Amino acid sequence: MFIVLVRAVLVFAALTAIYLALVFYQRWDVARRLAAEHAEGADPSLSREDYINRGLLRHERSFSRRALYAVFLLPLAIGTILGVLAVLT
């Protein structure tokens, strides 16, 4: 039973590391694209920092940001299903 708990903690730690890496990469990529848009003259009334901050706030509420939760949900759901099937057979 202890081994199962240790493996669960290791899996959770690995999924957390993957999730955080994807969040930081996605945020960096969005900020880079927003900076390029501002340099091309997207909204001259806003400063570069304000334009990027507004874009990042919009990104925080977007589907692509929320889709990263699948990093946790899909492996855990598959593991749960396989575990239940193993117990039932």
Image (cartoon, grey):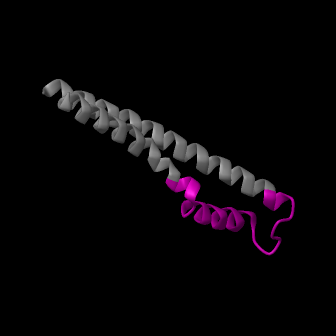
Of residues 86 and 30, the one drawn nearer to the viewer in this rendering: 86
Residue 75 sits in quarter:
top left
Identity of the residue drawn at 46% across and 46% down: 70
Does residue 49 appear left or right of residue 4 in this picture? right
**Residue at the right extreme?**
40
Identity of the residue drawn at 68% across and 68% down: 50
Of residues 69 and 32, the one drawn nearer to the viewer in this rendering: 69
The main secondary structure of the magenta stretch is helix
**Residue at the top extreme?**
3
Where 87 falls versus 59 (above or below)? Answer: above
Does residue 25 appear left or right of residue 88 in this picture? right
Identity of the residue drawn at 50% across and 55% down: 66
Residue 39: within the magenta?
Answer: yes
Image position, residue 20 (x, y; %) = 47, 43
Give the magenta range. Answer: 37-66
Residue 27: within the magenta?
Answer: no
Does residue 55 appear left or right of residue 4 in this picture? right
Q: In which quarter of the image is the N terminus?
A: top left
**Residue at the left extreme?**
1
- The total number of labels drawn is 0
Where 71 falls versus 64 (above or below)? Answer: above
Image position, residue 52 (x, y; %) = 68, 62
Residue 12 sits in quarter:
top left
Image position, residue 40 (x, y; %) = 87, 59
Of residues 36 and 59, the one drawn nearer to the viewer in this rendering: 59
Does residue 58 appear left or right of residue 17 in this picture? right
**Residue at the bottom extreme?**
45
Image position, residue 39 (x, y; %) = 83, 58
Q: In which quarter of the image is the C terminus?
A: top left
